[in-house]
Image (cartoon, rainbow, N blue to C red):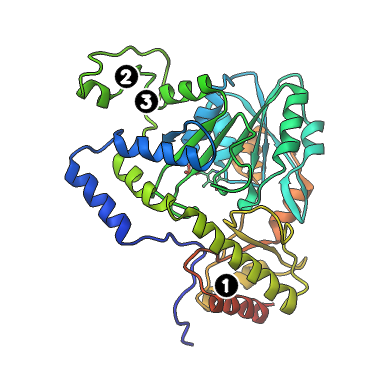
Amino acid sequence: MNVGKSISLGAPTLGKEEKQALCAVVDSGWLTMGEHVSAFEHTFAELHQAEKAVAVNSCTAGLHLCLLGSGIGPGDEVLVPSLTFVATAGAVRYVGAKPVFVDIERDDLPHIALSDAAARCTARTRAVIVMHYGGYVADLPAWREFADSRGLLLIEDAAHAPAVGEVGRLSDAAAFSFFSNKNMTTAEGGMVLARDRSVLERIRLLRSHGMTTNTLDRTRGHAYTYDVTALGYNYRLDELRAAMGLMQISRLLQWNGQRRELASLYRAHIREHLPEISIPFTHEWDTAAHLMPILLPAYTDRERVMAHLRSAGIQTSIHYPPVHLFSYYRNQFPDYALPHTEAFSSRELSLPIHPGLSTSDVEKVVSALRDAL
Ligand SMILES: *Cc1c(COP(=O)(O)O)cnc(C)c1O
């Protein structure tokens, strides 16, 4: 069988602009924490109607600093989804706090559930991390109220949802990812927003060893020495990545729009040809359309469906295996059950979605899926 061009799950959009931006940084001779990083932070903040942002070398580092900068530590509990990438929970462990896994609302709304979160609150609960699954924005006003009424911090794992809806605007802190398969990329990289200026400045300090001045200031003679006022990390972003990020961010809104159009097309084709498949969220949902999740009919052999699609040159994935079932967490929290998360995860399949897909690619995926079923 001639499979033709293969259709990847998610592919970065890269070209001449990125190459030129990278070459310009090499030619400049200044490789890290310089003007590109500042400009990238500024542009990202503006896009999210924030005053300032702090660039970091991954979303995972960003989540760690959101918790650390907010003063969360040993003895504290943080409510987290289990239907997420493991980094959401890992960051809670980095600061010595306990992740408390919360179930999702339901099959067609796989965000962490308000009622289950409320039921799992204790006197030790300090924060809740919401994750905008697939780019579909969680009900931030409701979570803000949830957090305020209990004196908790609201933190967003916004890895899937840059520049959409009210993401980054209602929470205490938000972390974004520029990993290669995200809506915009710097290969590796991330960004943090925080609404309290002193928390954001603390995050900036912790990003670079807790040092009070940076190399650029010292090189320019603005400062001759520095103090270290906290135990910080090296979570800095470099100039090459920031220059690439500036190119990517200028097209982010357009790409998010293309992703939404592809998602609508998938919905229309699936509704017409595969009514037994359900698709989470509604058609009008605020979304960056990072993923294209579908739910296969119960008792479908998902491995075989994936193998069939692979043989047709179509890459698929599962988002996500529940975090509470990974050995590391299961050993700490045995017999922990989240029935809705587990049921969703057992039927979920993520179809290819990225700005490089054409409408005929979408038709090809849906028709291969039909053959497979
Ligand atoms: C990708 C991702 C992360 C981690 O991002 P990195 O930049 O790779 O550290 C965290 N949370 C979610 C939901 C993700 O998808």
Q: Looking at the picture, tell me which residue is in the foreground, 280 or 88.
A: 280
First-in-chain label (2 vs 1): 2
Task: Inspect this view and state whether residue 338 appears.
Answer: yes
- Which labelled disc corresponds to residue 307? 1
Q: Is residue 282 left or right of residue 365?
A: right
Question: What is the quadrant of residue 18 in the picture?
Answer: bottom left
Name the outermost residue toward the bottom. Answer: 1
Q: What residue type is labelled 3?
A: Ser
Q: In which quarter of the image is the C terminus?
A: bottom right
Check disc 1 and report its element: helix, strand or loop: helix
Q: Mark 2 points at which residue?
A: 213
Question: What is the quadrant of residue 49 in the picture?
Answer: top right
Residues at marks 2 and 3, CA–CA distance in whole angstroms: 9 Å
Check disc 2 and report its element: helix, strand or loop: loop
Q: Name the residue under label 3.
A: 208
Structural crowding at the residue carrying mark 3, measured as other residues with C-alpha within 10 Å and reported as few (<14), some (14–19) or many (≥20): some
Position of residue 158 relative to residue 118, above or below, is: below
Position of residue 114 relative to residue 14, above or below, is: above
Q: Which of marks 3 and 1 is in front?
A: 3
